[in-house]
Image (spheres, coloured by chain):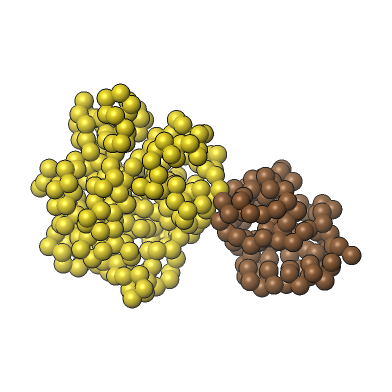
């Protein structure tokens, strides 16, 4: 059974920063990159995006690429303005307290189990 | 109006990747030999070699713009130019607050030293100047502008440490005074990829890390006189252009 965003966030302990009422999206795999140009080029619609970038351009990129959610790693601090912007754009930002490697590892196992 | 030839992106021995031969004395000498009227000193995340450069330039027929190449939190490189030493010293305080407390490894990145007019070491920066500061690009731009400075995202056509590589596109509300295109592309080549920047003010500079690089890419400024006031207003008047264009018809 495929998982939805809400269950995934709860199961993996990702804290929703924007989109508190998580939309009913089914994440399809994930992409890890801190270069927004790379994400624009390579990420596919429906993916989760793991990054340590917190600049507000991440919201536009996630929206443009129709990504399921941005997962910001290492509990990096994000400006309220960025979170507000994400809410306006319907972009979900989740915060992971783990570094990118552990975040991606857990997510990989989880998504494959859920399949 | 006069035409002045400028290279506004020159590193010194203070930059981790800057050659140790890049002392203020050698840089000024090389710049004069190359026929430059104006250079900007732009070390990574530090301004501590600017003063010596200005002191040497005072005795010579060349205008030195105090500057810095900021590496922002997003790891975007941005050039900043300042009116005087007072502004530079204020900006240095900002950098000192925002630099990550991570030690430089001279074996890997080279020594980061400021020197006097006779190439004697007067300061060694122990913190790494190679890393991004703890502030975002908009805040960095605001700091520069608050001190009366000029803010220019650097080598925006590069695949690393550029506004496009790091942020995908230029943030809509970022306040910048010009954009720098590196030697990797000609201006027409770049504008073909980014037609939305047709009206942008574009600087070309060498990004010299070694003496022989100085003046290998330059921008011409049209100004009545060589000083900061006219230099700053050149950005408002768009009174500069790349040397690869025809001087009379295409630049202005």
User: Horizontally, is B147 left or right of B213 in the view?
Assistant: right
Q: Is residue B56 left or right of residue B45?
A: left
Residue sitting at x 54%, y 44%:
B169
Q: Is residue B13 visible?
A: yes
Left or right of B216, for residue B29: left
The number of numbered discs placed on residues in the rendered structure image is: 0
Q: Is residue B171 above or below residue A36?
A: above
* Residue shown at 85% from the left, 62% from the top: A3
Residue visible at 29% across and 62% down in the picture: B18
Give residue A81's position: percent from left, percent from top: 62, 47
To which quarter of the image does residue B238 belong? top left
Instruction: Judge whether residue B143 can be spotted in this image.
Output: no
Q: Colour of chain B?
A: yellow
> Vertical placement of B224 versus B56: above or below?
above
Q: Is residue B75 left or right of residue B106?
A: right
Most extreme residue toward the right, as rendered? A1
User: In the orientation shown, which residue stands out farthest toward the left?
Assistant: B59
Return the x and y of residue B26 as percentages of the image width and height.
16, 57
Q: Toward which corner of the image does residue A110 lie, by quadrant? A: bottom right
Image quarter of the C terminus of chain A:
bottom right
- Residue at the spot 38% in from the left edge and 41% down from the top edge: B186
- Quarter of the rendering occupied by the N terminus of chain A: bottom right
Which percent across, then down, holds residue B78? 41, 49
What residue occupies the far top of the structure in this picture? Answer: B249
Is B217 located above or below residue A105 in the figure?
above
What is chain A's hue in the picture?
A: brown
**Residue B217 percent coordinates (x, y):** 29, 45
């Amino acid at each position: 059974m495929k998982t939805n965003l809400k269950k995934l966030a709860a199961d993996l302990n990702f804290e929703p920063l924007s989109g508190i009422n998580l939309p009913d999206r089914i994440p399809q795999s994930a992409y890890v990159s801190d270069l927004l140009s790379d994400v624009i080029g390579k990420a596919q619609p429906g993916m989760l995006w793991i990054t340590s970038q917190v600049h507000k351009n991440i919201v536009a990129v996630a929206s443009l690429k129709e990504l399921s959610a941005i997962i910001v790693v290492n509990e990096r601090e994000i400006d309220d303005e960025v979170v507000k912007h994400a809410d306006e754009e319907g972009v979900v930002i989740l915060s992971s307290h783990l570094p990118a490697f552990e975040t991606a590892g857990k997510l990989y196992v989880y998504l494959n189990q859920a399949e | 109006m006069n035409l002045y030839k400028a290279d506004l992106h020159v590193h010194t021995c203070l930059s981790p990747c800057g050659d140790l031969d890049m002392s203020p004395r050698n840089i000024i000498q090389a710049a004069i030999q190359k026929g430059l009227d104006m250079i900007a000193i732009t070390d990574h995340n530090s301004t501590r070699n600017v003063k010596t450069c200005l002191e040497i330039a005072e005795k010579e027929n060349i205008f030195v713009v105090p500057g810095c190449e900021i590496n922002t939190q997003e790891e975007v490189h941005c050039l900043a130019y300042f009116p005087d030493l007072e502004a530079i010293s204020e900006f240095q305080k900002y950098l000192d607050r925002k630099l990550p407390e991570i030690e430089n490894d001279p074996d890997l990145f080279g020594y980061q030293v400021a020197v006097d007019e006779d190439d004697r070491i007067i300061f060694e920066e122990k913190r790494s100047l190679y890393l991004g500061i703890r502030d975002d690009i908009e805040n960095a731009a605001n700091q520069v502008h608050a001190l009366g400075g000029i803010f220019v995202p650097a080598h925006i056509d590069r695949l690393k440490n550029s506004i496009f590589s790091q942020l995908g596109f230029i943030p809509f509300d970022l306040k910048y005074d010009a954009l720098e295109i590196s030697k990797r592309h000609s201006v027409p080549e770049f504008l073909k990829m980014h037609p939305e920047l047709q009206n942008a003010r574009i600087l070309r500079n060498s990004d010299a890390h070694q003496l022989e690089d100085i003046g290998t890419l330059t921008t011409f400024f049209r100004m009545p006189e060589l000083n900061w006031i006219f230099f700053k207003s050149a950005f408002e008047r768009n009174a500069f252009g790349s040397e690869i264009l025809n001087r009379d018809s295409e630049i202005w």
